[in-house]
Amino acid sequence: MKKIALIFVLVSILPACTKDLTKLNVDPKNPSVVPSYSLFTNAERALTNTVTSSSVNLNIFRLIEQQFTETTYLNETQYQLTFRNQPDAMWTALYSGALGNFQQAKTFMAKDVTDPGKQKNDIAITDILQVYTYYYLITTFGNVPYSEALDINQPFPKYDDAKTAYYNLLTRLDADIAALDVGSGSLGSADVIYNGDPASWKKFANTLKLKMGITISDFDNTKAKATVESAVTSGVFTSNSDNALFQYVATPPNTNPVWVDLVQSQRHDFVGTSQFITLLNPGTPAQDPRLPYYFAQNSQGVYVGASNGSGNGGLVYSQYSLPSGPLITPGSIGKVTNPDFPGLLLDYAETEFNLAEAVQRGYSVGGTVQSHYNAGVTASVAYWTGSATAAAAYLLLPNVAFATAPGTTPLQKIAGQEYLALYNRGWDAWIVNRRLDYPALVPPPNAFSAFPVRFTYPISEQNVNVVNYNQAATAIGGDLVTTKLFFDVF
């Protein structure tokens, strides 16, 4: 009788334990719903890692812009872009790592952020970073998937006309600026760059708008002028305290990608080029005060660069100046290769050079070409060295003072100093260099092509999204590194 009673009890309990069998399909270690803020932080990190990286497999613009050269393997220095499939890696990092996560974050923000003002700010800030990401895709490849991108129902998205997409980005940026409410909260610590401060993001958006306007100034001066003047009126960066910095930490995995690429991987074959170091140390009465922050002295205690593309195993790296940082070169004072050195998305020095260019082009932004040029140089020197006094002394040198600086036109003078200020930001240096064609960079010996003015489309797109790839390649004039993009007029 007791056995029968026990069986009855077990049978009566069993349905209660198994009535919701679907719970067995839930993996508690792999949630199907992710908080929007986690997606945002991950996308912000992925974006910053991509534009900051010095990896030969991803971001090789320091090599293309001849800030660095390789002493052993010269493929990237010689413009061989497909050897490690950098276009594929870059495309994936920006579309999947950054844009895809930003898009998902916006979708979830509409559900898990209940305060209307906060939700509006969150979505606007996320969209601003999507605009920023697309800026690099368009200025690198040309026509890219845009209107059908990020749509799971469009596995083979069409490529949008680069100019049309670019102008739509400007429209989005205006909407985001208008949507930001400085009186409401936002992302908080989920935003590593500005801690969710809407006022800072509004200034960032206007500064990006200024940059985007200047980028198209040779192509569409009327549009550029209106864009730049509107941005300045609304408020752009006014000091280094406005800089968009992603603060890395000293321990993996959230460390400075340059540290990962050069120190953690024990790589020593990236050294400064003789061309770049000569610009910083030309033998005039004083060297550029940023030199010891950019590069370290060699084993003999002097700054020496290698001739671009002259390596291939024949150079001993200790004879040349490596990127500065005590963890890679003991005794050096720079921080470029330190694990916690921040990634920089947008800064005040670049802003002042853009304003100098705007004045030269006749835009109403206040100031003079020289005043903005001086402010750009000062901002860069102060950012790296912490010394405004060093910047003032540097501006007195004949090769730096605006009146006597190298260059036959004011735009070349601006470009020359902006090139130096964009050290460690090779991608941006490449964009400016293509627009202003200064300083003139001589291709290395045995280069695989002429100087690349765009990246070819990813091999994955050529193999999978074939029809749309072919249409895009034809539309831009050929999928070649020598095909100029719409903004690169001269």
Image (cartoon, rainbow, N blue to C red):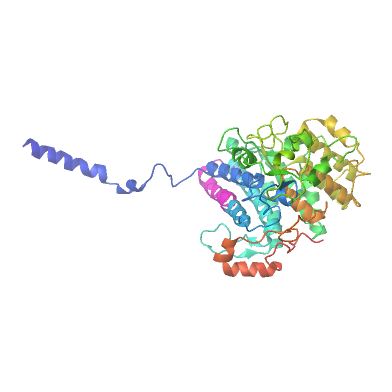
Number of numbered discs on residues: 0
Quadrant assignment, res 169: bottom right
Residue 19 position in % (x across, y down)? 27, 46
Residue 209 position in % (x across, y down)? 74, 49
Q: Nearer the viewer, residue 436 or 278?
A: 278
Q: Is residue 108 magenta?
A: yes
Residue 351 position in % (x across, y down)? 78, 44
Residue 313 position in % (x across, y down)? 68, 48
Please, which residue is most extreme toward the front here?
Answer: 314
Considering the image in quadrants, where does the C terminus appear?
bottom right
Can residue 364 be seen by looking at this rendering? no
Considering the image in quadrants, where does the N terminus appear?
top left
In the image, residue 479 above or below residue 364:
below
Q: Nearer the viewer, residue 125 or 265?
A: 265
Q: Is residue 305 left or right of residue 114?
A: right
Quadrant assignment, res 261: top right
> Could you tell me what secondary structure mostly forms the magenta stretch?
helix
Stretch in magenta: 96-116
Q: Nearer the viewer, residue 130 or 280?
A: 280
Can residue 34 be seen by looking at this rendering? yes
Please, which residue is most extreme toward the left here?
Answer: 1
Q: Nearer the viewer, residue 159 or 393?
A: 393
